[in-house]
Amino acid sequence: DIQMTQSPSSLSASVGDRVTITCRASQSISSYLNWYQQKPGKAPKFLIYAASSLQSGVPSRFSGSGSGTDFTLTINSLQPEDFATYYCQQSFSIPYTFGQGTKLEIK
Amino acid sequence: QVQMVEFGGGVVQPGRSLRLSCAASGFTFRSFGMHWVRQAPGKGLEWMTLISYDGSNKYYADSVKGRFTISRDNSNNTLYLQINSLRAEDTAVYHCARDRGRALLDYWGRGTLVTVSS
């Protein structure tokens, strides 16, 4: 199985900040990397696919990059609604593993 | 709009069985693969299983293979998850999710909570 490791596990930031979350795969997954946002008690929301493609309706302050084993999710100019937990997921091979999550909190 | 609603969760004793359902609406259900993903209390997301659009192909995480069975009824737009021999570690919120293609889970339900306890 491919292991996905996110860092940091938690992050404190302020509205207006720029933050970056990292996701590392235990083996190359090309660009088969997706990002999701989840707020407490809610369903996860699909943000980014194929490492860098924004899902329709997702604000342009979200961006993704990377390929192979190292990926990043960047949020520019944080908004109050962005405070949530973020998960990466590899869609290269079954089982479609997720990272452990990064909780983004308000400073 | 696309919507998935899971139901069937509850408190179940260890060793018992449970069937979860996911009612889908707002899209052509029979055209999409579907997944189940679970989330233990306070923990992250764990992929469980995938079924192809027509039900002909099914895939499972090793941790649930042999105990979990995914199925679907395309005539009633419903996805199912049969869980047998429930264990304490199966306690989680179970989400169903639509596969847009290539395991991109583009719409999710809010989930149904399964608590395994004596």
Image (spheres, coloured by chain):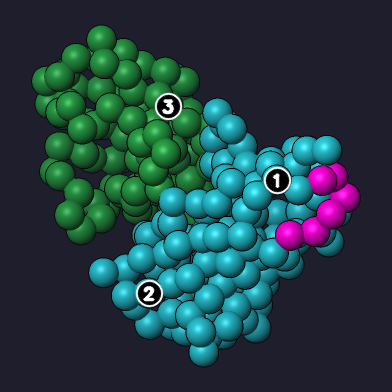
Query: Disc 1 versus disc 2: distance between alpha carbons?
Result: 27 Å
Magenta region: which residues? B13-18
Q: Estimate the x, y position of residue A59 in percent, counting from the top left.
A: 15, 44
Q: Main secondary structure of the magenta part?
A: loop
Tell me what residue is drawn at x 42 percent, y 27 percent: A102
Does residue A28 show up? no
Instruction: Give the crowd class for mark 1: few <14, some 14-19, many >=20 residues within 10 Å.
Output: few
Q: Which mark is residue B25?
A: 2
Label 1 sits on residue: B11
Q: Earlier in the sequence, mark 1 or mark 2?
A: 1
Q: Is residue A8 above or below residue B9?
A: above
For residue A10, side relative to residue B90 (left or right):
left
Which quarter of the figure has residue B81? Answer: bottom right
Name the amino acid, label 1: Val
Q: Position of residue B45 (x, y in %)?
A: 54, 41
Q: Is residue A90 visible?
A: yes
Task: Check if mark 1 and mark 2 are on a common chain.
Answer: yes
The local secondary structure at tag 2 comes to strand
What chain is tagged by disc 2?
B
Instruction: Tell me the tag on residue A102.
Output: 3
Q: Do circles 3 and 2 both sit on a common chain?
A: no
Viewer-side residue, B36 vs B94: B94
Question: Where is residue A86 drawn, in percent x and y?
Answer: 39, 34
Tag 3: amino acid: Thr
Please identify, in this view, whether the residue under mark 1 or under mark 3 is nearer the observer: 1
